[in-house]
Amino acid sequence: MKPIAPSDSAALPRVAGLLLAAGGGRRLGGRPKALLEYAGRPLVEHAVRALREAGCGPLHVVLGAAAGTVRERADLDGCVVVDNPDWAGGMGSSLRAGLRSLADTPAQRAGTGAQAVVVALVDQPGIGAGAVARVVHAYRGPSSLAAASYGGRRGHPVLFGADRWTEVAELAGGDQGARDYLKRHQAAITLVECGDIADPADIDTPDDLHLLKAVSEP
């Protein structure tokens, strides 16, 4: 894996944002992660804002558990909302649904759509626009493959050049998401250190809920 300095940049391409927000929070007692409260609003809004402020667009948000309630309570204006009826099967199904939604847009079919996509997870409140922007700046062409790293350890968000979307979707499965794909292509990944501006901790259990308070306070 090849590291990249935060200051490195190239002419910015059109990079879509794909937010995976379908999880049902099984280990949280069935509380959908998208609806967890962050600074008085649903957590999904924070994740969408991070992608938007980093310059990503269009934005596609994959919902699953309590999708109707998320639509009612969260402000997802300007986003393409994708329903994943197979969300209980794991993150892989949401990644496939999101990539399929992106690929099926008229602009993408016409060859004038996004040149890459940044994939983010809804349950990482410590990752904001700064980290997303650094990963966006790692774009180097339609075969780009980049990921945020924290102390040299790969994490999210992850950038996939458009030429990679088909294979990523084919290999996505279960709760692994793109893990198998990334293992196969480890040597091609550009790592973007973000440990100085972001916290990759995710919210899986009630013990993790303190993360919402920690990052919400001034």
Image (spheres, helix red, strand yellow):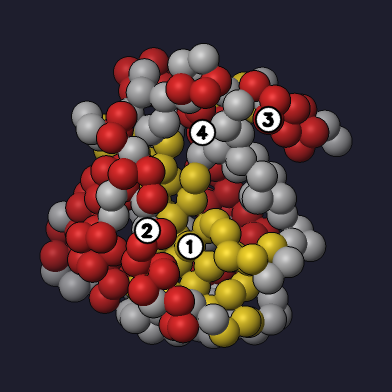
**Element type at marker 1?**
strand
Of the image marks 4 and 1, the number of the one nearer the N terminus: 4
Q: Position of residue 4 (x, y in %)?
A: 63, 82
Q: Position of residue 69 (x, y in %)?
A: 39, 16
Residue at 67% over, 59% down: 130
Instruction: Look at mark 2 in the image and give the residue it sits on.
Output: 178
Query: Is disc 4 in contact with disc 1, using a CB cutoff of under 8 Å?
Result: no
The label number, if any, that marks residue 158 in the structure image: 1
The label number, if any, that marks residue 44 in the structure image: 4
Q: CA distance from mark 3 to mark 2?
A: 24 Å
**Element type at marker 3?**
helix
Label 2 crowd (10 A; few <14 / some 14-19 / many >=20)? many
Q: Is residue 45 above or below residue 183?
A: above
Q: Nearer the viewer, residue 137 or 167?
A: 167
Query: Is disc 2 in contact with disc 1, using a CB cutoff of under 8 Å?
Result: yes
Query: Is disc 1 in contact with disc 3, using a CB cutoff of under 8 Å?
Result: no
Amino acid type at circle 1 is Val
Residue at 28% over, 49% down: 173
